[in-house]
Amino acid sequence: MARTWPTGSFGHLQSEHDYVVVRHFRDFDGGEHPEGEHWTFIGSSFLPYDDGLSFFAVINGVERQVRMQWREEEQGPIIDHLKDYLQAK
């Protein structure tokens, strides 16, 4: 299947590898990512203007974009410690 979303790695996340949420977090849009949620990572993109970071993944069987904001008062602490939230399956 040809993908139009960015592919590649981000930190410890590698494209087409499986991960599981091991610590609950909330994304920029208020979406909940509970423990046990399954991700197949596709890639990421960064928008410097708003410190916007998007993860693209198949989450529980559905292709999704997970928007984050890399600022201390938003999801910055999660992004900085991503290994504490998403681990290889």
Image: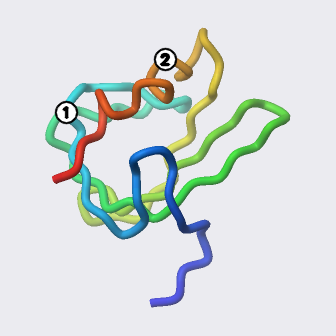
Residue 78 occupies quadrant: top left
Q: Which mark is residue 77?
A: 2
Q: Which element type, helix, strand or loop, lies under badge 1?
A: loop
Q: Is residue 42 above or below residue 52?
A: below
- Residue 6 picture location, percent across and down: 61, 66
45 on left or right of 18: right
Q: Which residue is mark 1?
A: 22
Q: Is residue 49 left or right of residue 29?
A: right
Kind of residue indicated by mark 2: Pro
In the figure, 70 relative to 36: above or below?
above
* x 56%, y 21%: residue: 76
**Residue 84, above or below 44:** above
* Residue that extends furthest to the bottom in the rendered view of this protein: 1
Along the line of sight, the residue nearer the viewer: 11 or 56: 11
Q: Is residue 41 left or right of residue 7?
A: left
Residue 12 horizontal/vertical position (percent): 40, 47
Q: Residue pushed farthest right?
A: 49
Residue in view at x 62 percent, y 28 percent? 69
Q: Residue at x 48, y 44 (%)?
A: 11
Label 1 – label 2 distance at C-alpha: 15 Å
Q: In the displayed orientation, state which residue is furthest to the front.
A: 12
Instruction: Kindly state the secondary structure of the residue where label 2 is placed.
Output: helix
Residue 65 position, x and y percent, is 51, 53
Q: Earlier in the sequence, mark 1 or mark 2?
A: 1
